[in-house]
Image: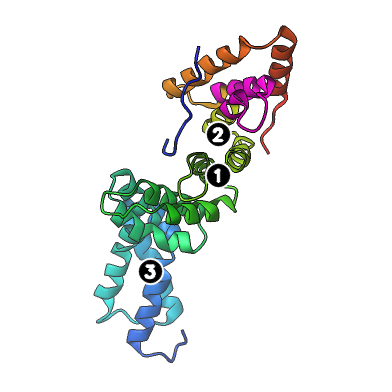
Amino acid sequence: MSWLQRLAIGKARSEHDPPEAQVTGLAAALAKCRDVAARGRHLYREAMVAVALLMFAFGLLVGIYHVQIEQGVRGLWQRSPDAGYAEYQKGKYATALELLRPSAEAGDAHAQSTLGLMYHRGGRGLQQDDGEAIKWFRLAAQQRDPVAEFNLGVMYSDGEGVPQDNTEAAKWYRLAADQGDARAEYNLGLWYAQGLGGPPDYVQAHMWFNLAAAHFPESDVSDRTLAVNNRKVVAGKMTADQIAEAQRRAREWKPK
């Protein structure tokens, strides 16, 4: 029985300023109210209460600037990262990039990882660019984002945007697998089973396939089946003692 496929990428002023400057400052403050934006349009009334409090703090008077302030509140949802993720899910990458880039540049690991995915896939209004994908995956991985770590492993395995390097791939798979990422656990099991870093290590391979099978959600039938089937292939090459050792390691595993 032959090995099954490796998993690939894809599967978050001063009071002396003129009124115009005060309103500009207020608009900037509103743009930072992510907690309001995250709750969506249905909390518009609550947002207006927040605006009233901000107006009091800035000493503004309701008058000719009322419309501008209200429009600023209504624009919170459209400019929020949540809107960017929604556009990403719709496949509107160019719009998602515009909405998510500020969060990614501010250090948000989920946004950075999502930018990496979009640049890796390309299309849908966005030029494919593996160099940009690697850049954003690295930034997210520096914050221990398991999705970015897994995706870096895939790109090193395939030599996309970087020289092909199985050892470097295993390093990133391991970092993600240590956090319980099922896809990384599966690919790491395959790495050990195929002996990509030296002689095959069936005990390690069985352990990681076992963990992957346990960590894939029940709804992910195809990937769980891959893990279970490859575990069976490995078990056919092991002694009873080796299988018992692999099972012990899987039971004692804890995320890092």
Residue 212 covered by magenta stretch: yes
- Give the vertical position of 22 relative to 235 (above or below): below
Does residue 10 appear in this view?
Answer: yes
Which residue is denoted by mark 2 in the rendering?
184
Q: Is residue 220 left or right of residue 186?
A: left
In the figure, residue 70 lies in which quadrant? bottom left
What's the residue type where badge 3 is placed?
Val
Magenta stretch, main secondary structure class: helix
Residue 95, which numbered label? none
Q: CA distance from mark 2 to mark 3?
A: 45 Å
Sequence-wise, which precedes: disc 2 or disc 1?
1
Sequence-wise, which precedes: disc 2 or disc 3?
3
Residue 51, which numbered label? 3
Residue 149, which numbered label? 1
What's the residue type where badge 2 is placed?
Ala
Which residue shows up at 75% across the image and 10% down it?
241
Tell me if label 1 and label 3 are in contact, CB under 8 Å.
no
- Give the vertical position of 167 relative to 68 (above or below): above
Q: Position of residue 214 (x, y in %)?
A: 56, 22
Q: Nearer the viewer, mark 1 or mark 3?
A: 1
Per the image, label 2 sits on a secondary structure element best described as: helix
- Give the vertical position of 172 relative to 215 (above or below): below
What's the residue type where badge 1 is placed?
Glu
Q: Position of residue 115 (x, y in %)?
A: 41, 53
Tell me if label 2 and label 1 are in contact, CB under 8 Å.
yes
Q: CA distance from mark 2 to mark 1?
A: 9 Å
Q: Is residue 205 left or right of residue 150?
A: right
Residue interval drawn in magenta? 190-213
Sequence-wise, which precedes: disc 1 or disc 3?
3
